[in-house]
Amino acid sequence: MIDIQKIRADFPILNKKVNGKPLVYLDNAATSQKPQVVIDSIVNYYTTINSNIHRGVHTLSQKATDAYEQARIKLQQHFNAKKSYEIILTAGTTHSINIVATGFSSLLKKGDEIIVSAMEHHSNIVPWQMLCERTGAILKVIPMDEVGELLMNGYDALLSNKTKLVFVNHVSNALGTINPIEKIIEKAHKVGAAVLIDGAQSCPHIKPDLQKLNVDFYVASAHKLCGPTGVGILYGKEAWLNKLPPYQGGGEMIKQVTFEKTTYADLPHKFEAGTPNIAGVIAFGTAIDYMNEIGFDNIAAYENELLEYATKKLLSIEGLKIYGTSQHKTAVISFNIGEIHPYDIGSIIDKLGIAVRTGHHCAQPIMDFYNIPGTVRASFSFYNTFEEIDLLYNALIKAKTMLC
Ligand code: PMP
């Protein structure tokens, strides 16, 4: 059960006013808000143990290293990786995808095929297009339908022994659709292809079991999980991470450096060159603890109630059309009202304290599919309330009256 009053008291920003109105934050698919424990964790790190990790014999350095490595273990446990060194700490989903896409340059040859879905964030499209340019590999796209679901027979038709890699998001940030990743992974493995799952939008709602999924790579960002920005993970099966070359050279990622030859450090350090966001990683661990204390099953159940309530309420507005109407979706509602430009709606309701996102949500191919410039996107989190949905509804009615 969600104790909404108690939870809201954990998030200092939720008491703030925006444009003189109480903040109604419905832009959670862009980033989540941060509970006080996460903010405290960052402040505590800089006020008590700030030091560089992995290199010092002095006490502070050891404390910082311990806290950093403990966070890695928390992440290993949360995502159920077999080994802690299969969790690479990165600057976020985008960084993680680029590590894999760049690494595959040496593993692909001309004519090899790699598969993406029609429903991806640009960060799970562009790095792969760059990989194709470097290698001559061919990018194929799993089609989607009007409801906002992937066409699995379209996927079947693309798979062959030429397929080397499949990369799809678990949940679409623009539509909220939950993709059938278990089937996608199983089918890819049957033709010998590896799979990367982009968990950026699913991880705040669904706790994945990476070993059970048998996925080869999984990427996510802390900032959608109540953690800080600029931190994320790249999970890779040990064998894959050993096969991939390092992404960046520098300190921390080496075994030995001479001018003749450098040898690389073992996992996870091979992929962690330079001084990382130490406070951010530690705070990511705190955020994971915080969310697990509430419980991901409780979070999902409550958010589903919000989604159901909001869907019914918004559909009662004449002319409002929702994009992404799958039965399998998380708490994201992408919509337009008649011909009104999403930006105009977003700007008006912002004046009423309501934060939603407008535009293409870094998923232009989805907008092209629906032949629209963009949508208004309201995305809910476990700290949102039914009253906030009523406020959104009232604000939309007001905006519609002003703009029609
Ligand atoms: N993939 C998906 C599905 C996303 O929702 C996002 C963030 N909106 C990203 C990738 C990119 O994440 P980041 O900006 O944290 O690197």
Image (spheres, rainbow, N blue to C red):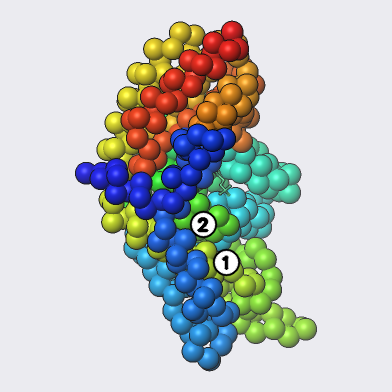
Q: Amino acid at mark 2?
A: Pro
Residue at x 44%, y 44% (from the top left corner)? 14
Q: Is residue 333 above or below residue 169?
A: above
Per the image, the residue denoted by label 2 is 228
Quarter of the image for the C terminus: give it. Answer: top right
Q: Nearer the viewer, residue 311 or 22?
A: 22
Q: What type is the residue that disc 1 sits on?
A: Asn
**What separation in Å lies between label 2 and label 1 (alpha carbons)?**
10 Å
Q: Residue furthest front?
A: 20
Local crowd size for mark 1, using a 10 Å CA cut-off: few (<14), some (14–19), many (≥20): some
- Helix, strand, or loop for circle 1? loop
Q: Are marks 2 and 1 in contact (CB under 8 Å)?
A: yes
226 vs 352, nearest the viewer? 352
The answer to whether residue 293 of the structure is visible from this angle is yes
The quadrant the N terminus occupies is top left
Who's the residue at 38% across and 24% down the image?
Answer: 390
Secondary structure beneath label 2: loop
Q: Is residue 62 left or right of residue 210?
A: right
Query: Label for residue 297?
Result: none
Quick one: which residue is furthest to the bottom in this view? 57
Q: Which class describes the residues within 10 Å of circle 2: few (<14), some (14-19), or many (20+)?
A: many
Location of residue 153 (image quadrant): top left
- Between residues 211 and 74, which one lies in front from this camera angle? 74
Sequence-first tag of 2 and 1: 2
- The residue under the point 49% across, 19% down is 396
**Location of residue 190 by image quarter:** top left
Q: Which residue is mark 1?
A: 277
Ligand 1 picture quarter:
top right
Q: Within the image, what quadrant is residue 401 found in?
A: top right
